[in-house]
Every structure is written in C-alpha cells, then in structure tokens.
Amino acid sequence: MASRYQTISIIKNDTGIPSESGNSMYAPTYYPTIDAKTDDNYIITGTEDRLDLIAYDFYGDSTLWWVIAMVNDLEGDSMYPPTGIYLRIPQNISEILNSYNRANT
C-alpha cells in the first residue's frame, strides 16, 4: 500500500518566503467517518500491542494503523494503545480507503 499522503495535494508557498518546511506543504487531510459494522472485529489490548502490528495482523499492511487509531479515538503520538481496552478493528478496509481517497483527491 502506498502512503496515505500520496493522493494529498501539495500547496506551494506563493509568497516566495521560505518557511521552516520549505516552500510547500501538504494540503489538509480529510478522514472519512467510519461507522461500526456487524463484521467489525474487537480485541482487548495487551501490554505488547502496537497499532502498526495490529494493522498488519488484520490488514496485511502496517501503514493502516491510522484507521484503528481513528475509529477508537486514540489521540496522541503513541503507537501503544492503553492496555486492557477494547479496540474496534473495521473489516471494510477497501471501502474506508476508497472514501479516504475520494475525500482527498
């Protein structure tokens, strides 16, 4: 799977004044609403669980960790979810990615 930023537009800085990140930046990223479905999986997290590894186990792609983080309202910069919580793992990943791509092209 390609980076989720592959379809995001790059905005050029038209002022000509370089910023810390250069003369361009990514356009805003729009994430789809992911409703619960009857075929979603649920797991209880353990101390060694990481979002990227869970994504790999369920989707075969560790870069899809953001889907699991988003549907479970896991904010912050840690790949380790809190221990002992239920995580919803959506199974309609193709539908989710299609919605994401439509919103960001």
Image (cartoon, helix red, strand yellow):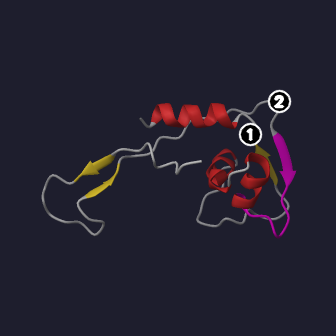
Residue 90's label in the rendered image is 1
Please tell me whether residue 45 belongs to the stretch shown in magenta: yes
Whether residue 32 sits left or right of residue 82 in the image: it is left
Whether residue 14 sits left or right of residue 100 in the image: it is left
How many angstroms separate mark 1 from mark 2 (CA)? 9 Å
Q: Residue furthest front?
A: 1
Q: Nearer the viewer, residue 78 or 59?
A: 59
The reply to whether residue 43 is in sight is yes
The crowd level at tag 2 (other Cα within 10 Å; few <14, some 14-19, many 20+) is few
- Name which quarter of the figure residue 29 lies in: top left
Q: Residue at x 64, y 31 (%)?
A: 95
Task: Please name the residue that numbered disc 2 is placed on.
Answer: 38
Whether residue 87 sits left or right of residue 73 in the image: it is right
The reply to whether residue 69 is in sight is no
The magenta region covers 41-51
Q: Nearer the viewer, residue 11 or 59?
A: 59
Residue 35 drawn at (x, y percent): 68, 32
Q: Secondary structure at mark 2?
A: loop
Residue kind at label 2, given as amino acid type: Thr
Please tell me whether residue 42 belongs to the stretch shown in magenta: yes
Q: Is residue 54 above or below residue 27?
A: below
Q: Residue at x 44, y 42 (%)?
A: 7
Whether residue 18 sits left or right of residue 90 in the image: it is left
Contact flag, marks 1 and 2 (Cβ < 8 Å): no
Q: Residue at x 59, y 48 (%)?
A: 1
Q: Secondary structure at mark 1?
A: loop
